[in-house]
Amino acid sequence: AQSVAQPEDQVNVAEGNPLTVKCTYSVSGNPYLFWYVQYPNRGLQFLLKYITGDNLVKGSYGFEAEFNKSQTSFHLKKPSALVSDSALYFCAVRDEWRNRDDKIIFGKGTRLHILP
Amino acid sequence: DSGVTQTPKHLITATGQRVTLRCSPRSGDLSVYWYQQSLDQGLQFLIHYYNGEERAKGNILERFSAQQFPDLHSELNLSSLELGDSALYFCASSDRDRGTLHFGNGTRLTVT
């Protein structure tokens, strides 16, 4: 069964500093990996995804993520944080070998606080 | 705007009651996923339908059921409601091959 872990409930970063939000996963086959962001009282918004190809994926709002197969990780990064990046971030995984069990599993989320 | 519509936005009901949450997916999307978001449980996968057929089930209680209709809208039925069912319920649709989900704004269910 597939699973996702976000080891940090909360991450605090000073504005202008680089940020990293961690994610590790477990799947049977090859992973499809996603990052989503949720602002208060809203649905989740897609940021970026890894399906295949280059391990460094670029997404919306200056975010990027690095796929590391050996460490089964897909950490979200941004070189310079903005106060407006403060939100709840979710990592998600879909197993390529999904057969009859086609689901997308989310981590518990990491709350990102960017301090002015 | 994601193009996914969920109704109602808010629902307040009493324990033991039954409610129906509705989701209209983005135009052209055949897949509909349902998730439950509560404070301490993150985003829990409930069920996935593709073009009217159930594709995967998660930790969905027997008191909960869902279906996807020929026009591709989906309904999540919650019965014998308990206080612990209070949560945000999200619907998301996708083009199945790539799996990017487009979320509605959710239905906030409060059971009193």
Image: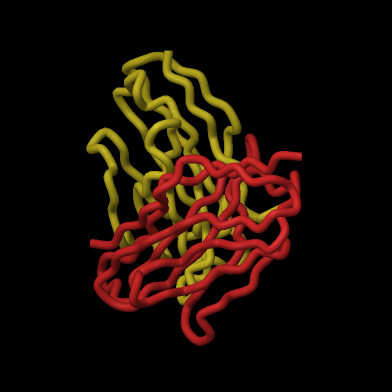
Chain A colour in the picture:
red
The residue shown at (52%, 65%) is: B94
In the rendered view, does B9 fall on the left or right side of A2? right
Q: Is residue A16 or residue A51 the one in the foreground? A: A16
Residue B56 drawn at (x, y percent) = 30, 59
- Who is closer to the viewer here, A113 or B96? A113
The residue that appears at 72% across and 59% down in the rendered structure is A80
In the rendered image, which quarter is residue A12 located in? top right
Q: Position of residue B68 (x, y in %)?
A: 42, 54
Q: Is residue B96 above or below residue B74?
A: below
Q: Quadrant of the C terminus of chain B?
A: top left
Residue at horizontal 38 percent and vertical 50 percent from the top = B67
Give x and y (percent) for residue B38: 43, 33
| Percent position of residue B104, x then y | 59, 48
In terms of image quadrants, where is residue B39? Answer: top left
Question: Is B86 located above or below residue B41 in the figure?
Answer: above
Question: Is residue A10 depicted above or below A5 in this figure?
Answer: above
Tell me if A9 is positioned left or right of A62 in this view: left
The chain that appears yellow in the image is: B
The residue depicted at 26 percent of the width and 38 percent of the height is B61
